[in-house]
Image (cartoon, rainbow, N blue to C red):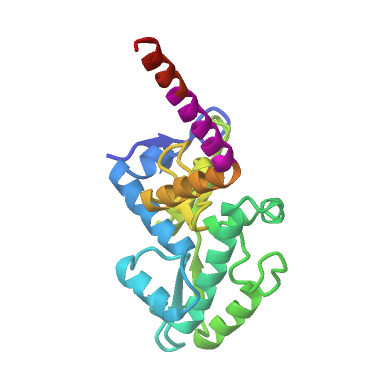
Amino acid sequence: MKRTLTIDWGQGGIDQPRPTIPVFTPSELASTNEKARLFAALEKFVNLGDTIEIYGRFLAQWPMFLPASIKYIVSEDNPEALFVDWATPACHRIALVYRNVLRRLWVKDQQALDSGLGSFLLGFDNALGTDLNPAIPGLDEAWREFKTSYRWWQIERPDLYVHWRLGAFLYNPITDFQRAVYILFRESWRAKVCPCCSRFLVAQKPAQTYCSNRCYGVAKQSRGLDWWRQHGEGWRRARLKASRKSKRNSRRKRAKHT
């Protein structure tokens, strides 16, 4: 059962029944297995190529891993709200904007950090749905293209609560993407870039540097070759000198016994 926190919105006495909302920490937001699944999807997403074919294959594997929850109204005569198709070119272009922002935060780009772009990824600012976003390259163009495909639309935003007694913000994400980004935000040490292949990775342990055993092996071999190029000649001379000395000592010992 998901733990809830009862919130007293008044100053002391309570006149009406108090609402309850989930309190999500990373461990409560996802089990160990679920967290691994979310991080696997997030790694795939941040490393996506640019083509819509690549994104289509990603959606086939992770159909619920969506950057935002957006619905559209079919028509004025039919007010039913349906979820947009993220496999369309218009939504694909928005997804690339999210990918690029995530990459900037992943490498701790100072301008991205100063601009508060984490709020955009988590979905509780109003950048998505407006036309003036100079801090997010490509978003204005992508959103204008989206509006040509979907005339009536609505964005479902995650709940962000202020809990006065706890002195904390309580965030309830909607999509798997938002859940994964939130957990990574709370454990940002995991966001690393492999120094061998430049792939973005979610580290399992603080000491992890490489994305795979293969990259670790390549880097280890490269370090060995670098050392050999710098010190190999001196090592060979020292070993040859030691070998010659050992042979001379052996000859002297044999000469003493004859």
In this rendering, the answer to whether 48 lies above or below 191 is: below
Task: Give the residue furthest to the top.
Answer: 257
Q: Quadrant of residue 112?
A: bottom right
User: Camera-side residue: 153 or 116?
Assistant: 116
* Residue 40 included in the magenta stretch of the image: no
- At x 50%, y 84%, the residue is 150
Q: Is residue 129 left or right of residue 52?
A: right
Q: Which secondary structure class fits the magenta region best?
A: helix
Q: Please state, as top left, top right, bottom left or bottom right, where the N terminus lies in the image.
A: top left
Q: Please state, as top left, top right, bottom left or bottom right, where the C terminus lies in the image.
A: top left
In this rendering, the answer to whether 98 lies above or below 248 is: below
- At x 41%, y 35%, the residue is 5
Question: Residue 138's x, y, as percent?
Answer: 64, 74
Q: Is residue 9 visible?
A: no
Question: Residue 193's x, y, as percent?
Answer: 53, 52
- At x 50%, y 54%, the residue is 196
Question: Residue 82's x, y, as percent?
Answer: 38, 76
Q: Is residue 148 left or right of residue 247?
A: right
Q: How many numbered markers are drawn?
A: 0
Question: Residue 59's x, y, as percent?
Answer: 36, 71
* Residue 232 included in the magenta stretch of the image: yes
Question: Which residues are drawn in magenta?
Answer: 231-247
Q: Is residue 108 left or right of residue 153?
A: right
- At x 46%, y 56%, the residue is 178
